[in-house]
Image (tube, coloured by chain):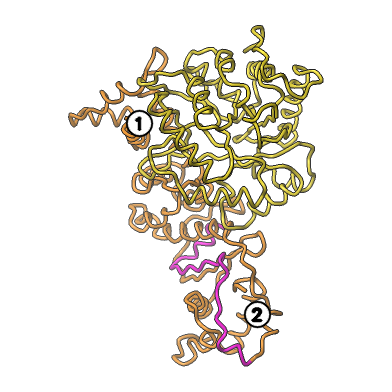
Amino acid sequence: MLAETQQLLWRLITAPEGVAAALAADSDRGGTLRARLARTVRGDEKLDAAERLDIYANMYFFRILDVLKEHYPGVRALLGDVGFHNLITDYLLRHPPAHFSLREAGRHLPELLDEHATRALHPCLADLARFERALNDAFDASDAPALRAAALAALPQADWPNLRLALHPSVHLLASQWPVHTVRAAIDRGENSGAPEPEATWLCVWRDDLTVFHRAIGAGEFDRLQIISRGASFGAVCAHGSEAGSTDDTAQDVAAALARWLADGWLAA
Amino acid sequence: MSSAARTGFTDLGYGVGLRPPHYGHVLETRPAVDWFEAISENFLVAGGRPLHVLERVRADYPVVLHGVSLSIGSTDPLDRDYLSRLRQLAARIEAAWISDHLCWTGVGSHNLHDLLPLPYSEEALDHVAERVRRVQDALGRRIALENVSSYLTYCDSVLSEWDFLAALAERADCAILLDVNNVFVSAHNHGFDARAYLAAIPVERVVQFHLAGHSDHGTHLLDTHDHPVCDAVWELYAVAVQRFGALPTLIEWDDRIPAFDRLQAEAQRASALAAEVCGDHARRDATAPLAADHGA
């Protein structure tokens, strides 16, 4: 009985058009939801059962909508309030929250945008959402210590080639055909820059101490960071691209990149 | 504490909810409040600023963990990962205690992120009491459960909310976090007597009060936590203090959050009112009857 009650309420609270519309649609199909609700929830002269349940339905939708507005301000800016509202309606149908934390409620929005109708309007939306999700994930990623230059310099140089590098848990890499970070940067300045023009872009998002940063990087640097994320040795990172000539990076470029990674805390100790 | 049922629940005084807009102010000025209550789920994260802030706050104040996703009334299995992480967090910050709500928040592995009431039936009572015992075993401590504001009741309820809560506390050997505003809101929405509610709750089980503001939507009151505590709720708080004693009291404010001073003033008002009700006695005799001439 208790399980049936909870399943009935969950179904009606999460109905995308509201409780009354869900009951009407069900009645049109010859369903029994209205009768089941009448047997389950009391109504009175102030509010009938559907109206009482609708209070919860509204709180469910708008609580999550508010959180996702905070997590995806760039997506919201490009779509506008009505477009974002409709997107989240679709999203909750496909990805109802399953985690104990509201912070996880919007985790799958980039995947939805990969195939959503809004893609035709703004092809960059999924990547923008991926970038904004990376900012959120970096914010409360693990506090693993970063590898700093002094610690690396203390190792015998003979050990460097076989040294296994790892990215700091807060580091997220994103390749896109659009400079999606410029959308978010404009939002943070209180502006709406609109959708960006296509431009091959490689981004790194990370947290140093308690502050989240992002930076556009070159293709070669992006590739090297990606092979680090797969557990490559320092020697393999240095050699990457040089044999095949796939990047124009010089040895000096690689050394400079390594110095930046160490300074910014992109590598885990 | 005045009875064994309150063992483990320290007399913390008057606190406020720890919310992100106040992090900087709290860390920089160490304001004069007795304790903070942190929303557990906001700190069940791997690292970063939330945990950093919580640990720094904990260095200067007692901290209580107050959850919103335990879903003690759900028919889904208990979330063992959640409980394990909650226990670790409580140990890490030496949480004064852990509380959550008498409600269900989801079913079918989904989370509504809302606090839904239960049918007050024997079936639900058996179900929840058994789960509370398992949760307390998993956490290694007694928990406090809070009464929620509600906007619906069920046809198959055979007990009043207060009788259900009292019976649950006895059967599961858990404590009660009495949200005075929630009693007021639900009393209005369902037409029961808030003072009768308080009078039916066993004194020795109540370990903490919550106070918050609500909104009037005409057909119902909504527990919005976006207003000051209203006069009628202050009056009901005085009744609660008269019955249960000057227990640790928390001001909740979660939306349209004002400057910290405003919350501090509310906590000070609670402290002053409790002192006025109790006189010089830190705690009232737990066996004394509820005064009939107080109330909202």
Front residue of this view, candidates B176 and A43: B176
- From the image, tell me which residue sits under label 2: A259
- From the image, tell me which residue sits under label 1: A2
Using residue A223 as the reference point, say whether residue A269 is left or right of it: right
Which x, y percent locates residue A136?
A: 54, 56
Q: Who's orange, chain-wise? A: A
Label 2, label 1: how many angstroms apart (C-alpha)? 60 Å
Which residue is rendered at x = 59% and y = 23% of the image?
A: B181
Which x, y percent locates residue B146?
A: 55, 30
Q: Are marks 2 and 1 in contact (CB under 8 Å)?
A: no
Tag 1: amino acid? Leu
Front residue of this view, candidates A36 and B89: B89
Tag 2: amino acid? Ala
Using residue A21 as the reference point, say whether residue B291 is left or right of it: right
Residue B259 numbered tag = none
Which x, y percent locates residue B284?
A: 72, 20
Query: In the rendered image of this protein, which colour is used for chain B?
Result: yellow
Q: Which corner quadrant of the image does residue B200 belong to?
A: top right
Which residue is rendered at x = 42% and y = 53% of the image?
A: A109
Write the start and end of the magenta stretch as one range: A158-185
Q: Looking at the image, is B57 positioned above or below residue B261?
A: below
Chain bearing mark 2: A
Q: Which corner quadrant of the image does residue B295 belong to?
A: top right
Label count reads: 2
Residue sitting at the far left: A30
Front residue of this view, candidates A95 and B165: B165
* Quadrant showing the C terminus of chain A: bottom right
